Amino acid sequence: MHDMRFTLPGQDLNREPFALKPPDFQKKCEVMITDRGYKCRLTNIVTISSQEKLFLLRIINPQERELFNFRPGQFLMLEVPGYGEAPISISSDNSNHEFIEICIRKAGHVTSAMFEAKQGAVVSIRGPFGTAFPMEAMEGSNVLLVAGGLGIAPVRAPLYWIGNHRDRYKNVYLLYGAKEPSQLLFSYQFEEWKKVSKVELMTIVENPDASWAGRTGMITELFNDFSFDAKKTFAIVCGPPVMFKFVCNYLDGKGIPMNRMFVSLERRMHCGMGKCCRCMVGSTFTCLDGPVFDYWSVMNLKEAI
Amino acid sequence: MNHLGFKIDKVKIASFDFTCCEGCQLQLANKESTLPAFLGLLDIRNFREISSERYDDYDIALIEGSITRSDEIERLKAIRAQAKVLVAFGSCACFGGVNSLKNKIPGEEAVRGVYGDKTVQTMPSTKISDIVPVDLMIPGCPVSKAEVERIIVGVVTRAPNNLPKYPVCVDCKQKLNTCLFDLGEVCLGPVTKAGCDAVCPTGKTVCLGCRGPADDMNFPSFIQIVKEKGLSLDEMHEKLAFYNGFADFLDHES
Amino acid sequence: MIYKVISKTEFRKFIDALVKHNTAYGPRAVDTGKDGKPIYQFMPVTSADEIDFDYTVTHSSAKHLFLPYRDELSRFRFNDEDWEQEVRYEAPPLILIGLRPCDINAINILDEVMLHGPYPSPYYLARRKNTFIIGMDHLPLPDCFCKSMNRHTVNHGFNLFCSDIGDKYYLSINSSKAYTFLKEFMLEEPSYEDNCLLIERRKTIKQSFTTNIEVTGLPVFLDIEFDSPIWQKWGDKCLSCGSCAMVCPTCYCYSVEERFDVDLKGSSRQNHLYSCNLIDFAQVAGGHNFRPRNGDRLKYRYYHHYRGFAANDNQQICVGCNRCGRACLADINPKDVINDLRLERESCMICVSPSPDRT
Ligand SMILES: Cc1cc2nc3c(=O)[nH]c(=O)nc-3n(C[C@H](O)[C@H](O)[C@H](O)COP(=O)(O)OP(=O)(O)OC[C@H]3O[C@@H](n4cnc5c(N)ncnc54)[C@H](O)[C@@H]3O)c2cc1C
Ligand code: SF4
Ligand code: SF4
Ligand code: SF4
Ligand code: SF4
Ligand code: SF4
Ligand code: FES
């Protein structure tokens, strides 16, 4: 009797060394590392408010460090061994290959574990994932950056980009609002953004305290303070959904075309690769077709806001 | 252990039983391959089933059983004052449990039925959270060893574990069980919180809801289904009342 | 594809030899329902006698053999401040007997989703490549509607497909592996008569469908009806129990959890098949739930199945097996929901006056 046990080509697959093959995120390929991250060391941890910390990550393997290229607006999946994964926006300068910065608010398992982690701890990242802000398309125009609360984290990446290529953009405005003065993050960088990156920075808080001398109210108040040429302006809006709805509607009224306003959506994510379906908005995956969407698409997505 | 740069310490734990069968505590002491590792996480300060030592400097208190006597209330409040994390352990502690069956008959009658003419002080069987705030619930009759381990590991590693929010049917279907409704029985799986791996339907007995209601479960639709399938509503009510987990829904209904 | 015929007795011998030497799954009666009819599931089999070749349909699909309900994605081992990650894509060879055309089509759809996107799943690929699939046709049950979805025939995605032509099976051999195995057995070239019988069989099957659902234009329709009150009506019945998704051959979404080992020396990252019907599917950190009501979630399942997602070219992923309808205690099934939706629209069209005159 013939031996009926069989091995299909797939068997060889199990023997293929997956270990250090760099993932090719652009090209379709048959097999890739979908579940192995890049090991990173937390080289620095800065407490920037009572709820948020800034982490500096350095990919340990130099080869992988070189391979990790992202564009402003993309996110990564942060793995804290034992605790799980969470999608986090990349909040740093994409020309800096040495360090990746992420800003985290304590919200659940993974984020709390990050709050406990000490300098030198080893975590891992997968990615980068998702769409980016179209920085090239914005060249030659004004750029209006609007950030509410933790929305400043994803906005820092395009800010750095603009700082690196300042001559390509006309006027750049950063409107930044928070609930309380103490929740205005990265205040230590305000001067740098104003002086070095030549960004017109305007801040506002909802509930001022005794020390606050600036503007008070909702972020849309700031639009009364200056005027800009809506026809020649792109907008990047990051913050809670209610905020970007207000802001985008306002800007729409001002005359910025909807496809020149970009927002970053937030959804539950378990894979980052278009498999788990947790991040669906309407018929679209936030992890593949987002998180950056133009406002026209957002308006046309079911359940987006 | 020193993971991610922060030390993971043993937790100081104590266990207290009120009115119950102690089955849940025994479940913990059951000899299994993970027992040594599990005990390794704990600094046992007071735990009758596992150790004879008694100390009062615990951080985590497991409360087993329901409250049926007024002196138990004082004891419970004292424990609450000491414990940083108070865990309602088992269905009796979480919902009142099987003990609640006696709530349906007047107190004196119950006493006479059990103790004859002796005078025994009693009160309706009460769940822990009616008396003191509860931090974590581990429902089950008895509790599932795997879930207890998961939750205690969560406490130790400071990553609090949530119970599943969905109903037992999910796990039951994943075990490829034949649905007991298809065999003409009333099963409480669709309204009961998962986490037990659907042990009862897997063993071909209906779920009696020992883990209490699933989050936002659809009670009106469930009753409708039982009616439409021509199954007995009385039987359904009896099952829902068994562990007292559905008391809020039943009160609402009447 | 090579076509042959084989007598049923010889076919049993072939299956017997195959399952004796390999891990195999086939349809078996596991219970008898209230109505006296057997309930089937794909179960491990070790001899041809254990297989119910003339089964009707299995209660659950065979998807969990490709996408296990719970699967370890990777493992971490801690050593003081550092750790190592271990990822394994191992899949033992498996033989799967008796899949219906809709079941094979469902696997083809899963291939599309799992392998053809920008991030192919190696876990799925390993299992898919190591599975030998033997399909079998059958007469539809009264509630099967795969013909409406155009999934009642299949021409790829299997190694061997058997059409029942009386006391013989008409074999479509779709892999050299299958052909090599079959060489050991008595096969015949299909005669003119066999060919006629095959065509006759296909015709009978096609004409036996009694449930039909109108799905043309459904994707647009679902977009338009996104806010229809129909969803709340059905949502009020829905138990949010996920049974429909668990038995469905094409529901694939999952949840990822990571757990420490009890000895704290490592941890395991696992995925767990989930369902968009479950309460916390779209809940984000901070507690906000993007689909808080039963109706929102139920709608979502229909949206995924009959509108399709951008990732797989907006294809409808339902194959029309009606397993979800049979498993649902609340009697929610695609036929009734879709008809209800269409009815609502049509009655609405009647009462809406034609576009106002331009003045
Ligand atoms: C594209 C994108 C970019 C993002 N960028 C950032 C960023 O730059 N910075 C940032 O801080 N966040 C960011 N987020 C949000 C971040 O992903 C979430 O805060 C994070 O996933 C929370 O993960 P966790 O493991 O800490 O929470 P989990 O524990 O996984 O919590 C997840 C869910 O469980 C619930 N939950 C958690 N704990 C409990 C509990 N104890 N009891 C009951 N329910 C609970 C939560 O409500 C939530 O629904 C981003 C999200 C997306 C999608
Ligand atoms: S047996 Fe019970 S738990 Fe299992 S599917 Fe049926 S109703 Fe749900
Ligand atoms: S199946 Fe129901 S009764 Fe049985 S252990 Fe689970 S929750 Fe309790
Ligand atoms: S449709 Fe039916 S099977 Fe699906 S979740 Fe709702 S009640 Fe459960
Ligand atoms: S329909 Fe729902 S349950 Fe099924 S795969 Fe899609 S998201 Fe998951
Ligand atoms: S949605 Fe229902 S009918 Fe369609 S494939 Fe899934 S189980 Fe079958
Ligand atoms: S995160 Fe899994 S599909 Fe988008």
Image (cartoon, rainbow, N blue to C red):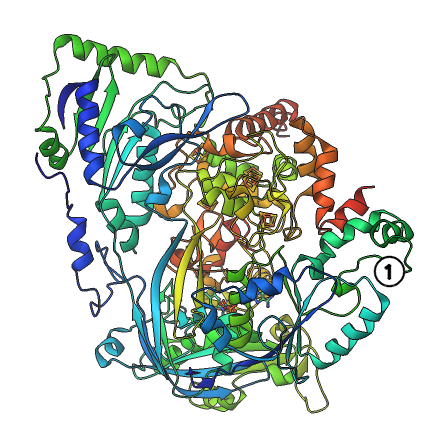
Q: Position of residue C12 (x, y in %)?
A: 21, 24
Q: Position of residue A228 (x, y in %)?
A: 53, 72
- Pointer 1 local density, CA inside 10 Å: few below 14, some 14–19, many at least 20: some
> For the image shown, how many numbered marks are present on the structure?
1
- Callout 1 amino acid: Thr
Ligand 4, seen in the image, is in the quarter at top right
Q: Position of residue A208 (x, y in %)?
A: 70, 83
Q: Between residue C358 and residue B175, name the one nearer to us.
A: B175
Secondary structure beneath dot 1 equals loop
Where A228 falls versus C336 (above or below)?
A: below
Q: From the viewer's perspective, is A44 left or right of B48?
A: left
Q: Between residue C114 and residue B2, name the one nearer to us.
A: B2
Res A105 seen here:
no
Image quadrant for the N terminus of chain B?
Answer: bottom left
Where C121 falls versus C16 (above or below)?
A: below
Q: Quadrant of residue C154?
A: top left
Q: Position of residue B219 (x, y in %)?
A: 69, 42
Image mark 1: chain? B
Question: Label 1 belongs to which residue?
Answer: B122
Image quadrant for the C terminus of chain B?
Answer: top right
Q: Between residue C117 and residue C268, name the one nearer to us.
A: C268
Q: From the viewer's perspective, is A187 left or right of C80?
A: right
Q: Quadrant of residue B226?
A: top right
Q: Between residue A34 and residue A87, name the one nearer to us.
A: A34
- Seen at 21% across and 56% down, the residue is A29
- Seen at 61% across and 56% down, the residue is B142
Q: Quadrant of residue A107?
A: bottom right
- Seen at 48% across and 77% down, the residue is B40
Disc 1 CB within 8 Å of nearest ligand 3 atom = no
Res C279 seen here:
yes
* Residue extending farthest front: B117
